Amino acid sequence: MNEIINQKHYKRFSIIFIMMVLISFFDVLSIGSIIPLLTLINESSNNTDGINYLANSLLKEYSYNEKILFISTFILIFFLIKNLITIINTKVISNYLLFFSAELQQRLFEKFIYTNYSNLIKNTSQKYIRDITIETRLIVNSYLSPIFQIIINLITILFFFILLIIYNPKVTIIVLISISIVSLLLIFILKPIIYKFGKIRQDATGKIIGYIKQTYDGIRELKLDHSENFYLNDFKTSIEKLASIGVSRAIYGILPKIIFESLFVFLFVIFIFFSLHSSFNLSESILTLTIYGASALRIIPSANNVIRSYQKVNYAKSALDAVKNYLEKNNIESNDNLSSENTQIIYSEFKSSINLKNINFSYDRKKILENLNLQIEKNKFYVLKGDTGSGKSTLVDIICGLQKANSGKIFIDDKDVNLLNKNWSNKISYIQQNPYIFNLSLAKNISISKNLNEEDYQKIEEIINKVGLSEFVKNLDLGINTLLLDKGLDISGGQKQKISIARALYKDKEIIILDETLSNLDKESKFEILNVLNKFKTTKTIIMISHDEDVLQYADKILLLKDKKIYYET
């Protein structure tokens, strides 16, 4: 839990705990004050128990009516104090839990965006979405909140049993032993069942998010193929599994209440039966039953809440484990431990060439690159081609500094360097096959910035002219301030590629890498993009992954990745 909760949180816990103790204390005082009141009203002669003895000692100078008035007033005051503290405590707990949930989500999202690329791609997007949006809230609502409930209810039960032990030790010990045995049995039996439900929920929730995301991403193809129901049955299975778990949890959740109430009725009947067959005064027995009945109205719901809250804690344990494991992982990008080779230096400047020598890379014991050698000269246009799965994207990731080679050396201008740093990545723009368009204005999509000044807008306008987006902007209602839809569904593929190139030019990136960028474009759009790129190849180093013959004629050099090595074509 230390990965999730720090010292600041423990201080808040201390305040909440003190308030819980006060609530339980005044709750017990208010109920405990009823005992001497009932004894007075019943005119019972049983004043030997500790509570009545204390009341008589404090009020012995007062008359019968005055005693009743004093005790009734104290009961009212204790109830008012308890309720006031309860309101304050509810505000404190709600404030803490809601802001803690926001803080935890922020921490996970921050961890996610700063996780190094090689570790990031090991998990699916739905796992990250599930952990950040669902598991964090589950930790708060079904783990931390129930823990608070367990604490306050255990304190309440403890105080009430202290009160009852003072009143009647023998009967109270019998009741205490009975409730303890039943509670331990319920916890022991239900714990593994509820934890299993939590794991099933976690798995089903991840699948549901995945089905929604994949259906949305592939909706165009699914509709054209009339396969909208591709994931429908899988979605239905997972959703019904969640519903089934919900029904089972509801049944297991109500079991403790039924069992505790049955136990109380059983003990009540046993006590009546014992009283009738003994020398107990019936009036005294009724008074005892009234006192224990009033206490049971607090103890049974509290015991039931403890068991139910413990069930919630077990149900959310899988969420806690997932978030804790993710926060424990030391996979944040850092310049302090980028390489085990102390002889390597951090990249500073790229003047003439990049040389990869004897590069080896394996993934899951499968060799992708083996003793690969490659030289990339500055301000040249390279086309990289090779069969599917040959390792083109892996090679590009190594050049970008997103992946680290298992062995080999990388030289920039004859200096042995480490590319896993922000100085190097700031020089590279990566344009994927389907460039991502953010749900922001065109200007902010190009700048990837939400704070733009007059100079920024002027620079964006100049770049728009260079990449051939002027006509596109003229047709937009608000020009460069027009909001573009999520994923760019309202603009063409060629326009999206030009926006991506504009991003690279806006950030003044020295190296532009394009990964199968032109494969889905028509011939006209393709040549538009190639002509735009051709304008900048004297000032930018361009590496394009492509098999297209039209692209090859623009290349200064053609690289073939085959048999885990690079071959140069002319």
Image: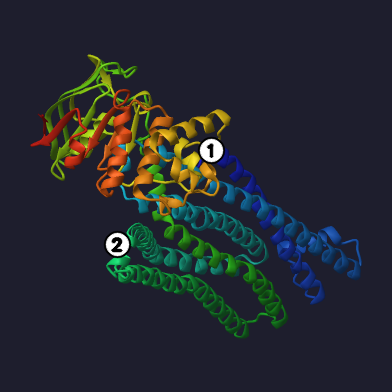
Nearest the viewer among 495 and 104 is 495
Depth check, front residue: 112 or 525? 525
Q: Is residue 179 left or right of residue 545?
A: right
Residue 541 image position (x, y, % from top left):
28, 26
Residue for badge 1: 450
Q: Is residue 2 visible?
A: no
Residue 566, quarter of picture: top left
Helix, strand or loop at mark 1: loop
- Point out residue 290 in the picture as x, y percentages from the top left corner: 69, 76
Q: Viewed as shown, does residue 429 lie left or right of 404?
A: right
Quadrant containing the C terminus is: top left
Q: Residue type at mark 2?
A: Glu
Q: Compared with residue 541, is residue 206 higher up or lower down, i.e. above or below?
A: below
Quarter holding the N terminus is top left
Q: Is residue 118 left or right of residue 476?
A: left
Is 185 situated above or below 281? above
Residue 416 lies, with reference to residue 505, above or below; the image says: above
Q: Residue at x 19, y 27 (%)?
A: 556
What percent of the width, then of the height, locates residue 565? 11, 32
Q: Residue at x 30, y 66 (%)?
A: 224
Under tag 2, what secondary structure? helix
Please tell me how crowded label 1 is: few (under 14), some (14-19), or many (20+) other residues with Cα within 10 Å: few
Dots 1, 2 in contact, CB < 8 A: no
How is the model colour-coded?
rainbow
Ranked by sequence position, the earlier of labels 1 and 2 is 2
Q: Decide: few, some or many residues near mark 2? Use Cα within 10 Å; few <14, some 14-19, many ≥20.
A: few
Indicate the position of residue 536 as horizontal and vertical percent values.
Answer: 32, 28
Q: Which residue is mark 2?
A: 221
